[in-house]
C-alpha cells in the first residue's frame, strides 16, 4: 500500500507544506526532553485538553508570547471526511511514515503531519479532532514522533523500553541511577517493571524513555509516554544510565553480557520511528554506538518470581 | 536460496546500512526494520561486497587474511564465504549484479 492509503481517503492530496486553516489562536509549550515543543493554532478546548493531559510539563500561559522558543508545530483543521473510518478493535496502531532527506510525512488515525528540517526542524499537524481525548491522542502520537526525531538531531535517542530507577532510595549511591529494559512487545517490559515496582523501585515509563548524552555519560530522561506504568505528567527528571538489559522471559534467571555489537543491535531495534528512516540511519547508528560503548549491556532472562530489582542493583556494584 | 559461485558478483542492497564494532557488524535493513549482528567474516564480506569484485576475489582476500593470522586453509574460507554469501543474499542483504546493472 502506498503512503497514507491506510488512513486517508486521498493520500495524493497530502499537504505539500505547513499551511492551512488554524483551529484557533491559542498555544501551549511543553517541556518534554528535546524541547520545548510549542504548539500553535489551537482552540481554547484543545489547549485545555493538552494542559490536562501533560499537566506540569506545560508552561504557564504567557500573554503576547509571540513566536517564543522551542520546536514549533502549527496545528490545522482537516475535514473528518479526509480520514478513513477504521475499526480499531484488536488493531495494532502504527503511524505510516514517508521519508525524504528534508522532511517526513506522517499519516495516522485522524491525523496528517509533516516534519520539515529546513530552515530548522518544525512541524505541521492536521486533524479533524476538536477536543477531548481523541485530540490529545492525536497530539501525543505526533509528539512521540517529533521527540524521537528531535532527540536524534540533538545526539540522543528515544527507546522503546522500560526505565526503572531507585529514585531517591537507599544510601548505596545508586538511588538516582536508572536501567533500561529493552525488548519487543511481549518480551516482558511491563512485567519486569511491575516486579521492580513491587520491590520498591520507581518506574519512569514502561513504554518510551529518552537517553541524552551528558558530559558525565548517558542519562535517562523521563518522557510522558507510558503504557501501564509510569508518570504521564511529572517533570522531566534525568537519571544516570547504569546499564541496558535485553529482556527474555524464561523459567529461571540468567544474565549474560552482550557484546557491543549485540547491544547496538538491541538499541537500534528499540529506537522507534527513526530506525526506519533511511536518511537518518547513519546518525542513529552513530548515537547508538556511543551509547553501546558507554554503558554495559546484558541479556536478562527472568521468571515471574524474579527479584529483578536486586539483580539490577547487584549489577551496579 | 541464491546459487553463489566464485564468479558471482554481489553488492550490498541499497537499503542495507551497517556499522562495525569490535570485530562484529550491526546491520540495519530499512525495508524490514530488521537489525542483525554479523560475526567478523560476515562483516568482512559486507565490506567486500562492492558490486565490482567477484566472490572469488573476496575468497582470495580473506584467505590471505585468515590464513596468515589464524592458519585457516583456503578451502575452508571458500566454503564459509560461499555459504555466508548465499545466506546473506537469501536474507536480502546482498544482491547479484547482472549484466543489465553494468550496462
Image (tube, coloured by chain):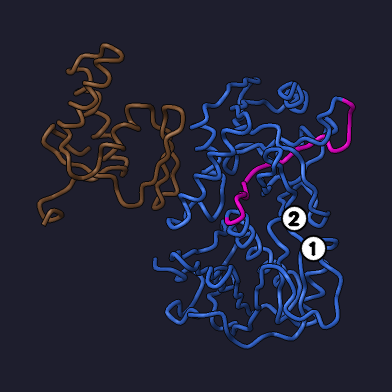
Q: Quadrant of the N terminus of chain B?
A: top left
Residue A78 in sight: yes
Q: Which residue is mark 2?
A: A224
**Residue A197 seen in the figure:** no
Q: Secondary structure at mark 2?
A: loop
Q: Quadrant of residue A129?
A: bottom right
Do tag 2 and tag 1 residues touch (Cβ < 8 Å)? Answer: yes
Quadrant for the C terminus of chain B in the image:
bottom left
- In the rendered structure, the answer to whether residue B98 lies left or right of residue A51 reads left
The residue stretch that appears in magenta: A153-171
Residue placed at 60% from the left, 78% from the top? A126
| Nearest the eye: A152 or A184 | A152
Coordinates of residue A41 in the picture (x, y in percent): 70, 82
Q: Please tell me the numbered disc located at residue A42.
A: none
Taking the spot 16% from the left edge, 32% from the top edge, the residue there is B57
Q: Colour of chain A?
A: blue
Disc nearer the start of the sequence (2/1): 1
Chain letter for the part of the structure drawn in brown = B
Amino acid at each position: 500500500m502506498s503512503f497514507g492509503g491506510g488512513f486517508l481517503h486521498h493520500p495524493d492530496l497530502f499537504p505539500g507544506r505547513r499551511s492551512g486553516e488554524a483551529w484557533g489562536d491559542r498555544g501551549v509549550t511543553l517541556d518534554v526532553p528535546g524541547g520545548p515543543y510549542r504548539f500553535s493554532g489551537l482552540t481554547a478546548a484543545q489547549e485545555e485538553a493538552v494542559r490536562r493531559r501533560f499537566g506540569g510539563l506545560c508552561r504557564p500561559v504567557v500573554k503576547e508570547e509571540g513566536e517564543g522558543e522551542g520546536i514549533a508545530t502549527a496545528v490545522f483543521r482537516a475535514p473528518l471526511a479526509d480520514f478513513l473510518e477504521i475499526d480499531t478493535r484488536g488493531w495494532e496502531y502504527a503511524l505510516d511514515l514517508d521519508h525524504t532527506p528534508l522532511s517526513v510525512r506522517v499519516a495516522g488515525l485522524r491525523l496528517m503531519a509533516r516534519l520539515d528540517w529546513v530552515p530548522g526542524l518544525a512541524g505541521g499537524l492536521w486533524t479533524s479532532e476538536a477536543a477531548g481525548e481523541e485530540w490529545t491522542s492525536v497530539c501525543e502520537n505526533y509528539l512521540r514522533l517529533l521527540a524521537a526525531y528531535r532527540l536524534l538531531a540533538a545526539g540522543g535517542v528515544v527507546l522503546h523500553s522500560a526505565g526503572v530507577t531507585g529514585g531517591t532510595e537507599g544510601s548505596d549511591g545508586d538511588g538516582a541511577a536508572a536501567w533500561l529494559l529493552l525488548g519487543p512487545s511481549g518480551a516482558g517490559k511491563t512485567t519486569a517493571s511491575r516486579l521492580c515496582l513491587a520491590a520498591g523501585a520507581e518506574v519512569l515509563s514502561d513504554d518510551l524513555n529518552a537517553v541524552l548524552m551528558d558530559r558525565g555519560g548517558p542519562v535517562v530522561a523521563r518522557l510522558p509516554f507510558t503504557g501501564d506504568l509510569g508518570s504521564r505528567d511529572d517533570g522531566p527528571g534525568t537519571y544516570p544510565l547504569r546499564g541496558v538489559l535485553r529482556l527474555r522471559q524464561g523459567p529461571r534467571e540468567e544474565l549474560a553480557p552482550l557484546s557491543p555489537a549485540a547491544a547496538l543491535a538491541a538499541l537500534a531495534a528499540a529506537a522507534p520511528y527513526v530506525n526506519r528512516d533511511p536518511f537518518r540511519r547513519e546518525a542513529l547508528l552513530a548515537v547508538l554506538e556511543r551509547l553501546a560503548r558507554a554503558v554495559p549491556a546484558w541479556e536478562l532472562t527472568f521468571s515471574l518470581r524474579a527479584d529483578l530489582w536486586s539483580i539490577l542493583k547487584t549489577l551496579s556494584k | 536460496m541464491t546459487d553463489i559461485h566464485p564468479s558471482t558478483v554481489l553488492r550490498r542492497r541499497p537499503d542495507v546500512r551497517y556499522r562495525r564494532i569490535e570485530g562484529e557488524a550491526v546491520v540495519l535493513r530499512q525495508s524490514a526494520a530488521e537489525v542483525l549482528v554479523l560475526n567478523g567474516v560476515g562483516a568482512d564480506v559486507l565490506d567486500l561486497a562492492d558490486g565490482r569484485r567477484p566472490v572469488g576475489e573476496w575468497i582470495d582476500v580473506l584467505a590471505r587474511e585468515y590464513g596468515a593470522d589464524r592458519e585457516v586453509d583456503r578451502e575452508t574460507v571458500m566454503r564459509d564465504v560461499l555459504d555466508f554469501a548465499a545466506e546473506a543474499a537469501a536474507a536480502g542483504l546482498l544482491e547479484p549484479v547482472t549484466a543489465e546493472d553494468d550496462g
